[in-house]
Image: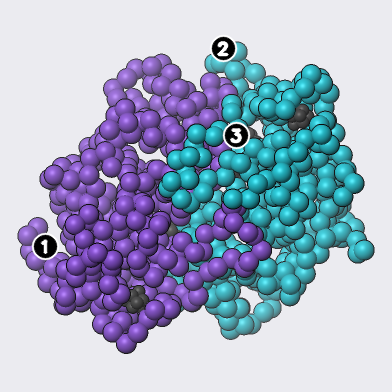
Amino acid sequence: MALLDVTGLEVEFETPEGTVRAVSNLDFHLEEGETLAIVGESGAGKSQMMMAIMGLLAENGRARGSALYRGADLLGMTARELNAIRGNQIAMIFQDPMTSLNPYMTIEQQMTEVIMHHRKLKRDEARAQAVEMLRAVRIPDAEERIRQYPHEYSGGMRQRVMIAMGLLCEPELLIADEPSTALDVTVQAQITQLVRELREQAGMSIILITHDLAVVADIADRVMVMYAGEVVECGSAEDIFYNPQHPYTRGLLDSVPRLDRASDQDLHAIPGNPPNLLDLPVGCNFRDRCDEAREECREPPPVWRDETGRMSRCVLPMEGGKRVDPDGTGPESRATNSASRENRE
Amino acid sequence: MSKPVLRVQDLSVTFTSLAGSVFNRQERQIRAVDGINFELFAGETLGIVGESGCGKSTLARAILGLLPPNRGRVMWMGDNLTELDEEAMRQRRKELQIVFQDPVASLDPRMTAGDIISEPLWTFYPKMARLQVDERTRGMMKMVGLLPNQINRYPHEFSGGQCQRIGIARSLVLNPRLLICDEPVSALDVSIQAQIVNLLQDLQKKLGLALIFVAHDLSVVRHISDRVMVMYMGQAMEVSEKERLYRKPLHPYTNALMKSVPVPDPKLAAAARRENWLTGDMPSPYRRPKGCVFHDRCPFKVKRCEADVPPLRRMENGDRVACHRAEDLDLSVVEA
Ligand SMILES: Nc1ncnc2c1ncn2[C@@H]1O[C@H](COP(=O)(O)OP(=O)(O)OP(=O)(O)O)[C@@H](O)[C@H]1O
Ligand SMILES: Nc1ncnc2c1ncn2[C@@H]1O[C@H](COP(=O)(O)OP(=O)(O)OP(=O)(O)O)[C@@H](O)[C@H]1O
Ligand code: SF4
Ligand code: SF4
Ligand SMILES: [Mg+2]
Ligand SMILES: [Mg+2]
């Protein structure tokens, strides 16, 4: 059984302008001990998908579908049940460090509180653990600097505090949302090494949301690519990097500036903008920006899969893949899918 | 040659905080920015790189007068910003803009995206017509890849990268003459990164914008910068013309930073992991090493590095470097 099995996940937000479809018809799973990276366009729904699974959507948000964690549906749980799982079994590192740290408490107060709460340790033991973890994420003078307030830390240091707090609870599953945006290459390398060690020692599973494809290449087993609320491609890290199938994935990889390549070409951006989530087009969401687009793309594109679990959502056939969804995942099939789930609840 | 628009002279910022044990409270000082000097011309981009905590954000804030420096001057078109009175500074502010590092936290959660972006317009041009403000705001949103129909949404209703773009739109709305971007594209996917970088370069050509671009991503910095300053423990290690810096760094620290850049390729990543160019940690800011601040991590260290501080000195080609051995080291990068 997969550790986490998400099917038919939909996330919508009600706004005065209408309904924002942030995540549509999303399926994925995570095996125990596995590291899954989620990449994709800014605004594609990566963070909100995780927020939905963890029961942390904003008030105007709504989730449908199911997210089985060791067989139990997280989406059907009460706030209390979710609280017990969050922090003990599942830890989350949020995208924005400053909004998840309390500006009026020292780093020490915040970290020891977490440890005392989750690990039932005494204060001085908790403090020692906190200092050790800060050292592990390379905060210089951790012993002394643990007394400081968040605003006295640099951006990258705050982010490392968030990582340290996530790791302190020794979770089975770590969900990290853009944990390395403020980290320089050296600290980043040290922290990925730390995470790799914890993964091996404790068998931790990881979902890593990131724009940093070098980090993905370094640590991910599998990669899931999202565009406008949908998974457009998923496969092993090597498949995605060396043999991308979906035009969006190719565009994304082509946009990466690299130091080991000649520099003075213009940075390559995929032309155009992502679709309006208030009014998604019928057919392929990537159509307006795709240089392979053709007439059939006005219909919802088919899904291709192979026996390794690789998938792509496009009219272009996937190498070695079978078309599993000949009629496409149209709005009709989506609707019945989520309606039946709602009835079950 | 024209005159520089910005001249930063010997700029230093020291923070004092309480440290020590509960029984033995001590005041500790961190020299976050320590004697920085550089010049910037209209239409030019200076990239600033360096490890986390080396003082990049502090330098950015001190240049714009958002933090009082302990020492030094910031000359902007002939005015010393550190000595301007409030009203004069207010007038200058319109030309000087910053994009803050922490995208979500730097936006006021009670204001809509439209209000955040247009606020500088209301502040500096209170008589501007509502319609005109609105049009300009929507135009800015489009430019950074946001949809104008999101104008009435609050920051928490945007994704991380969308918040970062709201910050960028706000900083550009007044057509500033100096823009300091502190990790402006860190929360963006590579395609939108490229879009923003290309946008900044266009504006630069059109408006002669002077740009300071702080980023940890050395490949983006390489792309956008004319010159690059490499910082370590609050000091400049090297300030070089971009292509020269990337082809043949002068300072061992620059070299180590560049060799540590990971590549987006699973097989190469595994190989790169085995080569560790930068061993050890950054020393404690409380106990700054004597001599060269980099000496305890430098593979090229000689006796004198432990005692003498290498000054930032100008080489024949105009690049500047703070290393005793700059002439006898050959740190050429072999292109893959
Ligand atoms: N409370 C909300 N109300 C309305 N729309 C929202 C709300 N929260 C998020 N959204 C929208 O949902 C979409 C998905 O957001 P999400 O934060 O998941 O993106 P993301 O993939 O994490 O992007 P990034 O890489 O920029 O962080 C975005 O277009 C965002 O504007
Ligand atoms: N308000 C403050 N009070 C005390 N110390 C501070 C304050 N602001 C920054 N510092 C310290 O000054 C040093 C430089 O911080 P700064 O934020 O400039 O680093 P940075 O180079 O921007 O790092 P990063 O890449 O992580 O953002 C750090 O050691 C930081 O902890
Ligand atoms: S379905 Fe058509 S438009 Fe969509 S990605 Fe494939 S080729 Fe491009
Ligand atoms: S001065 Fe000495 S220690 Fe410092 S960078 Fe140069 S060689 Fe290394
Ligand atoms: Mg996000
Ligand atoms: Mg910073």
How would you rate the neighbour count of disc 2 (Cα within 10 Å): few for under 14, some for 14-19, many for 20 or more? Answer: few
- Under tag 1, what secondary structure? helix
* Ligand 4 within 8 angstroms of badge 3 C-beta: no
**Tags 3 and 2 in contact by the CB under 8 Å rule?**
no
Name the residue: 40% across, 64% down: A249
Q: Amino acid at mark 2?
A: Phe
Which residue is denoted by mark 3 in the rendering?
B277
Q: Image check: A233 left or right of A250?
A: left
Give the color scheme: rainbow, by chain, secondary structure or one colour.
by chain
Hey, which quadrant is residue A172 in on the image? top left
Residue, disc 1: A341
Front of the two marks 3 and 2? 3
The amino acid type of the residue labelled 3 equals: Trp
**Residue at 65% from the left image edge and 46% from the top image edge:** B334
Q: Which residue is mark 2?
A: B23
Quote the CA–CA distance across marks 3 and 2. 40 Å
Judging by colour alone, the chain drawn in cyan in this rendered image is: B
Can you say whether A132 is above or below B88 in the image? above
Nearest the viewer among B93 and A41 is A41
Residue B66 on image: x %, y %: 71, 49
Residue at disc 1, CB closer than 8 Å to ligand 1? no
Percent coordinates x, y for residue B120 in the rendering: 65, 67
Determine the image quadrant of residue A139: top right
Q: Tell me the colour chain A is drawn in.
A: purple
Residue A66 % position (x, y): 17, 56
Give the number of marks.
3
Q: Nearer the viewer, residue A9 or A285?
A: A285
